[in-house]
Structures are given as C-alpha cells and as structure tokens.
Amino acid sequence: MWHAARGLRRLRWFHIFVQGFLLGVFVAGAAGQVVVLDGQAGGRVFEGLGAVSAGASSRLLIDYAEPYRSQILDYLFRPHYGASLQHLKVEMGADVNSTDGSEPSHMRSRDEENYQRGYEWWLMEEAHRRNPKIILDVLPWGAPGWIGHGRFYSPDMAEYVARFLEGAKRAHGLEIPYTGIWNEKAYDPLYVELLHKTLLQHGLATKIVCCDEYYGEHQWQIADAMREDAELARAVDVIAVHYPRTQDGALTTTHAAKASGKPLWSSEDQPNPGGGPFVSRDWEQGGRILARLYNRNYLEGALTKTEIWSPVTSYYDILAAPHSGLMYANTPWSGYYNVQSTIWVTAHTTQFAEPGWRYLDSACGYLPERGSYVALRSPNGRDWSVIVETIYAKHPQTVTFRIRGGLSSGTVHVWETNAGKIFEHVQDVQPVQGSFTLRFDPDSLYSLTTTTGQGKGTAQPPANSPFPFPYKDDFEGGELGRAPKFLADQDGAFEVHACRGRSGKCLEQVITEKPIPWGPLPDPFTLAGDVNWTDYVVSVDVLLDQGKEATVMGRIDSANVFEDPKMLWPSGYVLSLRASGEWSLVSAKYKQAPETLASGWAAWEARRWHHVTLRFQGEAITAMLDGRELTAVRSHAHSHGMFAIGSDWSRAEFDNLSIGR
C-alpha cells in the first residue's frame, strides 16, 4: 500500500510538472525570448570602439576650412554628438607609402627630431580636446632608411618608437598608453622584448599591443608563443589582430588567445571581410554590416575593443581602398562632408557604454529568428545598456528583460536605427516589478539604456563641388616645412621650403634615402585634381640637382599602387626629365609594361630653374621645356584623370604650379 501511494503521488507531481512546463512554454512563446540582466554576472571589460587614422587616410581633413573642419571632428570625437569615438590609433609616419600615401617621419636621421610634421599630432590634439578620456595608440607602418641600416626590427626602431612617445608628451601634452610593433608584418619575439625594455628604460608606462597581423591562421600565434616564453608574455599587454574572421565571416579567435588572460582586440576592422571590397557606408551596404560586427566581435571572438580603419575617408577616390571611413570628407575646397550611417551605428554602442564597463555574459546571445544582443553594466553596478541587432531577421521578435543583481529598474530609454530611422529616441519604458517587454522589428539596431545624455549632432555641410579649375599655387602662402593644401604625397615628402636660386617659397621633395617599406614603394610623387578632367595643361617650374630626376604627370586615372607593386608611377602619362638632359614621355598602366611614347635629349642645365609643360587635347599630347616643344604624340591610353609632380629619391624643387586650358 505504501509503495502504491508513493507511486500515485509521483504520478500526480509528474502531471503537475508537465502542465507547468507546457504553461511555461506557452508564456515564453507569447512573450518571446527572456533575457535576465543580472548585475552580478561575469564578463570581460569593455574597452571601447575606435578608429585608425593611418595610411594617409586623414590627409585632406586638415585642409578643410572652418567651421566645417570642426563639424567633422565633432561628429567623430565629441561625446554624445556623433560616433563619440573612444579610441584613436594613428600611424607613426616614415615618409613611405602606407596605403593611400605617405605620412611624415618625426626623425629623418639619427640626430634629427621634429614633432610638428604632418597632421596626426593635430588630429590627436583635436580628439583629446573634445574627449579628454579618449585612449590614444600608435603603430608604425614603415621606417626611415637609416633605422637599423635598413632592418626594421632593431634597437634603432625601439628607440624611434620611444622618442615618438616622449615627443607626444613633451611637444603636445599627449599621453599615449599603447603602441604596436609593425603593421601586418610577422612579429619578431626578440624585438617585442627589446621594445618592452626600451620603453621601461625611457620611463614610459606605454603598453605593447601585439601584433596587428592580417587575417589568417597565423594571426593568433602570439598567444601560443606566450605560453612558452614568459618574457614575451610579460612584454605583451594586449593581443590584437586585423580583420579577425575567415572569408565566410566566422571569427578566428583561438582558445589559447581567450585563455591568455590578456585583453583581445580587433585593432583594424571594417564592415566587410578582410580583403573584401570597400563599400559605401549607407545603411544597406555599410551600417547594417557594422551593426552585426560590433556585437559579434564580442559574442564570437571575445574581442573587447574594435577599431575601424579609418575614422574618415579624407583621401582621393582613385587611391587604394576608397570609402574606408566612418565618415566621408575628401573635398576640402568645398567644405562638403557626409555623415554616413556607420557614424550612428557606432554611436549605438559608444553613447551607451564607456571603456571600463563590463559585459554581462549571461545576457549576451542570439535571438531565435536571427539577430544578437550584448548587455553591459557600468562600474557603479547600477546603470546598464543592451545593444540589439536584428539585421537578418524576417519577422518582429519580442523579448522580455528581467532585471536583478543590483541593476537599476528605472526608466529604460530606447533608441533605434534602420532604413527609415537614424539614431532616434523612439520610446521610454518603465519596468514593472523589474521586468519589461519590447518588440524588435527586423533589419534594425537598438540601444536600451538607463543612462541619459545621448545626442544627435545637427551640423549640416555645404553643397559639394569639384576640384577648382583652373588651379594655381606658387606656395607663397604655405607654411614652411609642411605640405601645401590639397596635394597628397604618395611616397617621400613634398614640403614648402625657401627656394634655392630664387626668392620666395617653393615645394621640395626632401627624402633622399629609400625608407623601409610596408607595401609597394613607387618613386615619390604628390597628386591632386579631378579624375574627370580630360583636356588641360599642367605647367610647373622645376629645379634639379646634378644626376637627378623630376616627373610631371597627367590624366592619372588610378593611383592604387597595390594594383601593381612594381610600378614606379601611377596609371597615367608621365614626363620624366633627368639632369643629364635625357627625357621620356611614358604611358603607365598597372599590370602592363610602361609604353614609351617618345624620348630624347635636351640641352638644359642642372641646378637652374626650368619651365615644364604637359598639354592634353583629345588624343594629342604635347610636352614642352622652357617654351620649346620636346614632343607631340597621340595616344588614347588615358582619357581623363588627375595631375601629379614627382621625383626619384632625390631633392627636387617645384614652383608656380598651374593647371588650366
């Protein structure tokens, strides 16, 4: 009897359990997914979202006139206004092409230092002025030729990095807490350890980020090496990779990396696969992809910081990888800029969580019908935010959030972005007994938060306009030691200096020793203009030293040096003049042998000024020297494009640059 009664009780309890289970399923089905926001849950520390100003990607930004330049900077760096970037990494220049041009070096010889060259110092200062809490970082792409007698991994390079960090503090009042090794190059463990020791010897607390390698199986190998090398593990503070996913989009973070105890960063990323095409940053092609990337970098890769290359597309479209920036601003003569959807996608995280907040892993995951969410709490343990993306969802989804563990049950503010809304505050929700339910539409991005103060900038740009034509520059208005407006150096350094052999200011290419390259190494040239120009005349005064060479170019239809790393010039027509009197007119095309259209010898003197002209009229091309015709040829290889002037790796001077009919 006792056994029978116990069996009957078990049967009844089982029946009640099944009924309760089915009721729970019914409630869950009606309410959708349940997410528990527990302030006591564990998770990694969020270290921010940022951008990488490198590869000359910010070159044209400094040439914008006010107020438009400040408006662009506000959209990038001003808290609670636009992207509100929390991290800025800049290139440590070396006067060598690093994607879309060359950035100036702070030490062009062992005994020379200059911490005013270029625009990265200015950009860091402007970012810091807007957000004093912004985290700064630096990474070399190349190095001057004197470094290590041409060897990058050397004591010279470690000293070069240390001097940069000291100069940032001394000349600009900037603390740079992180530095990298060498952009997308295989690391040398002995150099990493040497750099660590050198920084300590200089009294610098700057931490080492290693190793910024490009996507592939090898990019996390530093984590395995650190397990076997205690000194290397002590030297490395952050493990960072570029484009940390496979071609099919899967994150590549290894178990060894996750178990290393080091922060893990995506230190260069894009809303496209590594190596894939760079696309415009509207919602459809850029914003919605980036919305998934930010969430999934943590969910799948345990990556606590993501940095986008670049903050702003401020380089000419005919260069490599156009449209890389969160914003678009490459016509400084017009003042025009485009605040793209990627600015607001970034704001959906940066305006709702700050570095030092912590992820709540138990409240990070995936929605049942496509989509993801990550939750973070503030250091005070009260405020919290959740970022939800439903990019590939086809139907609305309902989620119930339950709050506990000391988190605030105050008003929840909801912001939304999609094809029809751009960073809009759409509703406020008051939790009831620590719970609330929201419906999320497909193909959207949401931020839920107990914080306030978020904002959407209102500044508007003027209309866009083409490059000015006709165009002249005698360089008299240029600042000594700096590049003139609108000219974008692609190798070497073209700076305003006092003229030799005449009064006033001239433009001089000053790098005479080939740097240690990161990628392709064309001869130095600087370009500007409009790719749509067809018939025009380039004229310029030129001064050459004995045995050297200068170039005048036109109808440049592509300057993407990665299309043909062996090519010394861009794709266009190139008039080369040598101090010996030899000259040639060449049609250069990537992945084709240069075609010499004409060549010869002219009686001209080195170390004296000469006037050079290159005229385009339909298929007719005429080259002139000091008013005398060198050649007149016909070619249809290039019908339109920009202009450039250049040299070999020698000092060449230019004056009275003119583009007209």
Image (tube, grey):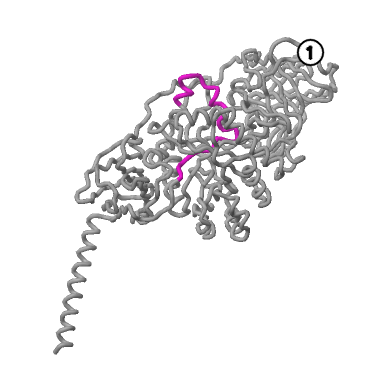
Query: In the rendered structure, which amino acid carries the disc numbered 1?
Result: Arg
Dot 1, how many residues are within 10 Å of its Cα: few (below 14), some (14-19), or many (20+)? Answer: few
Q: Secondary structure at mark 1?
A: strand
> Could you tell me which quadrant the C terminus lies in?
top right
Observer-nearest residue: 605 or 165? 165
Residue 243 position within the rendered picture, expressed as x and y whole percent measured from the top left? 54, 47
Question: In the picture, residue 9 is in which quadrant?
Answer: bottom left
Q: Position of residue 104 (x, y in %)?
A: 65, 30
Judge left or right: residue 630 versus residue 405.
Answer: right
Decide which of 73, 597 is in the foreground and name it: 73
| Vertical order, 450 against 296 (above or below) | above
Note whether residue 324 is visible.
no
Residue indicated by mark 1: 628
Q: Magenta residues? A: 47-71
Depth check, front residue: 346 or 385: 385
- Reply above or below: 15 against 499: below
- Residue 472 painted magenta: no
- In the rendered image, residue 305, in percent from the top left (x then y), is placed at 48, 45
Q: Is residue 411 left or right of residue 91?
A: left
Q: Is residue 310 left or right of residue 195?
A: left
Quadrant location, the N terminus: bottom left
